[in-house]
Image (spheres, rainbow, N blue to C red):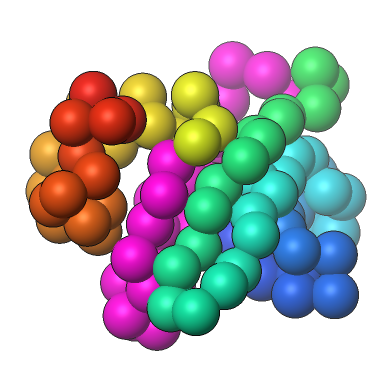
Amino acid sequence: MEPQVTDRPEKSRYEILAGDDGTETAGFAEYHLSEGEIAFIHTEIDSRFAGRGLGGLLARGALDDARTRRLRVLPYCPFIRGWIGKHPEYADLVPEARRARFGL
């Protein structure tokens, strides 16, 4: 089964589900949502799922959802910030006036 990214607003995080049956939480990206902004604060992939590209899938899924919801992204999390740096087509999600602060 293909990994799936899902928003879990009750936990303030996006989760990526993987495993043989697609129900194991392989990782998450925690966020804080406030007034049209989503601040990503921590991303983690379970070591059992390391090296499978799930972190990138998680970042893409979370950022695509932020775009759909028209949220401004504040990438405080080093992983999300680094991923945006490697995928400049997502830099427009970060407010222009704040990109320098994040090195974008």
Please tell me whether residue 38 is drawn above or below residue 30 in the rendered image.
below
Where is the N terminus found, in terms of image quarters? bottom right
Please tell me whether residue 26 is drawn above or below residue 6 in the rendered image.
above
Where does residue 7 sit, x and y in percent of width and height? 66, 70
How many numbered marks have been drawn onto this rendered protein structure?
0
Give the residue at x 38% y 57%: 73
- Specify whether residue 21 is in view: no
In the image, the segment drawn in magenta is 49-75
Where does residue 77 sit, x and y in percent of width and height? 54, 32
Left or right, 25 with reference to 45: right
Give the residue at x 66% y 36%: 42
Please tell me whether residue 46 is drawn above or below residue 3 in the rendered image.
above
Please tell me whether residue 69 is drawn above or below residue 98 in the rendered image.
below
Left or right, 30 with reference to 92: right
Give the residue at x 71% y 30%: 44
Where does residue 36 sit, x and y in percent of width and height? 43, 78
- Specify whether residue 60 is in view: yes
Left or right, 68 with reference to 31: left
Q: Does the magenta stretch include residue 48?
A: no
Q: Nearer the viewer, residue 90 or 22?
A: 90
Left or right, 63 with reference to 100: right
Q: Is residue 54 magenta?
A: yes
Where does residue 40 sit, x and y in percent of width and height? 55, 47
Give the residue at x 64% y 55%: 31
Q: In which image quadrant can residue 84 be found?
A: top left
Q: Which of 51 and 42 is in front in this view?
A: 42
Where is the C terminus found, in terms of image quarters? top left
